Image (cartoon, rainbow, N blue to C red):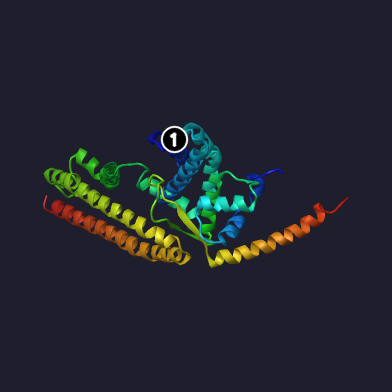
Amino acid sequence: MKTIQGDQLRGHLETLILSVLERGEAHGLEILRRLDQAGCGLLHLKEGSLYPALYRLEEAGKIQAVWEEEPRGRRGARRRIYGLTSKGKRELAKGRADWARFVQIIGGIVGAPA
Amino acid sequence: MNELILKELKIVVERAVRPVRATMTRKRRMREELLAHLVAIFEQEIEKRGDGQVALEQAKRRFGDPRELTGQLQEAVPRWDRRRSVLENMNCREGESAWHLAARHFLVMLTIYSLPMLPLAAMLAVGRLPGFGPLETQSLLARAFLLGIPTVALVNVFLSLGSASLLDRIGPVLCSKRWGRILLALLCVLLLPCLVVPLVAGAALLLILMSLQTIRQWRYQTEWA
């Protein structure tokens, strides 16, 4: 099956992140692993691109982050553990409703047989 | 992982983060987090492939183009942080040593405080200040240039370094919350006039008193000449 590339994901990435964080707190690599797993390996995102989206969400107060206590085996660089805030949960619910509406409208047009 | 590989990974992170216009605290956070991610994907790749060089290339490929990432990171930097970074660059440059910073500050302060003294220096070149004898003029200006201005500049360096480190500590705590940003803005609005108005008023008063004293002395000398 054809993969979904970064450009196609743009605009949905923030909602995707919020939805995988609903399952529990995670660092960047774990968020990507969950996205990959949920997308059956068909979502192809440049991994560095995850972080600007995380910073935007954090700045907007939709997620919060804490530094992990010890950088186990990663040469001094620490990771940050991200979790949903109550604002993030509300945003996720809104994102899901928007997505359902989008699919309903666009699906009705694109999915309709000629 | 050897030092060479780690250096290569740091270069990738640096290429992405260095051009971003943001405060040093924010960029430090980006650097550390992106490096941790890059190291982790390198470790995954080396486990899969075994060859360090191949794993490095694969990790870079997975991470993405640093130039593209710079643009994305820049978009994630809030406007207030970008504005603060401009002030921060004037105050303290990235990678600058503490001694270099202190010396640069001292020179800047010295220049700022010396500028208003230039008319006086011109008068010294002519010979004397109105109302003062040539020797008194020289001694006054020598005291101002050699002792007064460097002392004030030095005190100002310590004050600005102290305020910068204080802002570094409380800034991120306050700025991370909406109420903190509002509080900081209110403090600035209330505190700045409280500091600036007395300073300006004090300087103006001092200037008026000095002028009056000079005129009085000049009159006294012309009357008794």
Tell which of B175 and B119 is nearer to you.
Answer: B175
From where the camera sits, is residue B76 visible? Answer: no
From where the camera sits, is residue A47 visible? Answer: yes
Determine the residue located farthest toward the right in the rendered image. Answer: A114
Which amino acid is tagged 1? Glu
Tell which of B151 and B142 is nearer to you.
Answer: B151
Residue drawn where x is 24% and y is 58% of the image: B206
- Looking at the image, residue B5 sits to the left or right of residue B196; the answer is right
Residue drawn where x is 44% and y is 37% of the image: B11
x and y, in percent, of residue A59 in the image: 51, 58
x and y, in percent, of residue B169 in the image: 35, 58
Tell which of B104 and B54 is nearer to you.
Answer: B54
x and y, in percent, of residue B197 in the image: 34, 62
Tell me how many marks there are: 1
Q: Secondary structure at mark 1?
A: helix
Q: Chain of mark 1?
A: B
Q: Is residue B215 above or below residue B3?
A: below
- Looking at the image, residue A30 sits to the left or right of residue B141; the answer is right
Circle 1 residue: B8
- Looking at the image, residue A71 sits to the left or right of residue B139; the answer is right
x and y, in percent, of residue A28 in the image: 51, 51
- Check the picture and name the quadrant holding the N terminus of chain B: top left
Disc 1 residue crowd, few under 14, some 14–19, many 20+, Cα 10 Å: few
Q: Is residue B207 above or below residue B14?
A: below
- Looking at the image, residue B216 sits to the left or right of residue B23; the answer is left
Asked which quadrant contains residue A96, the reply is bottom right
